[in-house]
Amino acid sequence: MHFDRRKFLHIAAGAAALPSLAGTARADAYPSRAVRILVGFAAGSTTDILGRLLSPWLTARLGQSFIVENRPGAAANIATEAVVKSAPDGYTLLMVAPVAGTNGWLYPHLSYDFLRDLAPVSGIVRVPNVLEVNPSLPVKTVPELIAYAKANAGKLSYASAGIGTASHLAGEMFNGMTGVNIQHVPYHGDGPAMIDLMGGQVQVGFATMTASISHIRAGKLRPLAVTTTTPSPALPGTPCVSEFVPGYEASSWFGVAAPRATPADIVDRLNREINAGLGDAKIKARLVDDMGGMLLTGSAADFRKLIAAETEKWGKVIRAAGIKAE
């Protein structure tokens, strides 16, 4: 039998390229059906608003429907576990909220580890939280709120989007650093929290700029300060909490993740399209101008590093304050 060495090497080289070509073909074919984006909070929450801002862009760019599905409860653990258990094929995604960095500290018996069992895809935005009050509360500044809370100990309450959320931790940090005792009332997302804050069932909030801004502009909530160390252009003239409480800082960050073992080419494609969306003038204006946010452009690896850093930061706060899931 005649053995053609050159032909053999040519065939072998082609075979070696097949995995790469298969990955390219898979990414090019994705998606071939609708994609679900799970949100761990109720409609109207910041995570929900961002998911619904992103989904039309991805639908238009990738040619299949990206459908937001709300799975509120247990500080987004229900939605997160659903994604962890989903097939790693890119057809079930998770809108990531700051609880991704806190739930591991608050719920010691979770069935998942976020960075082990999920694949970060892309960051979206980091936004300030707003220290705000119902307009009926007779305070207009942070010092006035502190004085009023001390004079009316145990009579004020603050709403959060849920245990371990950024608004919860921002409130606990405020209590700890000012010596006040504003009672915590958790909700299933910013949406219902805002309803009760505007209705007067609770008096104080630390919600994200995203959830707060429209109500503030409508005069339904009174902003006292933003929780970042620099003022927000979305609320000109509003001071920072740190001007009155030195060292105070909190913010909320959001992104997208997929199940662990989702093919890297699919993760990369989603990352590229999300980053392209962050460069779109309309989306950028909504995130930066309307929400006062800072865009989290970058790679999937960049988003993983952010989650790891935030997990370490808030773990220290939770342990120091003795915060536990109720």
Image: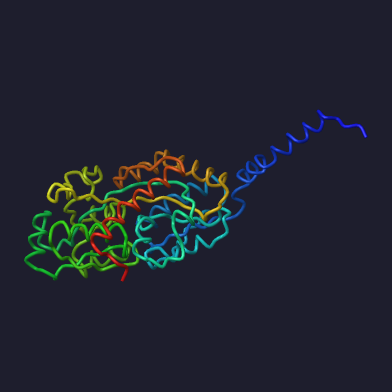
Q: Quadrant of the C terminus?
A: bottom left
Farthest-out residue, right = 1
Q: How many marks?
A: 0
| Residue 222 in picture, x, y percent from top left | 18, 56
| Color encoding of the figure | rainbow
Q: Nearer the viewer, residue 116 or 133?
A: 116
In the image, what residue occupies the spot 52% across and 56% down? Answer: 259
Q: Quadrant of residue 35?
A: bottom right
| Residue 131 in picture, x, y percent from top left | 20, 55
Q: Quadrant of the N terminus?
A: top right
| Residue 49 in picture, x, y percent from top left | 38, 55
Relative to 253, does residue 298 appear above or below in the rendering? above
Relative to 272, does residue 45 appear above or below in the rendering? below
Relative to 8, does residue 94 appear above or below in the rendering? below
Q: Quadrant of residue 195?
A: bottom left
Farthest-out residue, top = 6
In the image, what residue occupies the spot 31% across and 56% down? Answer: 315
Q: Quadrant of residue 15?
A: top right
Q: Nearer the viewer, residue 220 or 306?
A: 306
| Residue 201 in picture, x, y percent from top left | 21, 70
Q: Nearer the viewer, residue 281 or 292?
A: 292
Q: Does residue 81 appear left or right of residue 14 in this picture?
A: left
Q: Does residue 274 appear left or right of residue 158 in this picture?
A: right
Q: Nearer the viewer, residue 197 or 8?
A: 8
Q: Does residue 161 appear left or right of residue 38 in this picture?
A: left
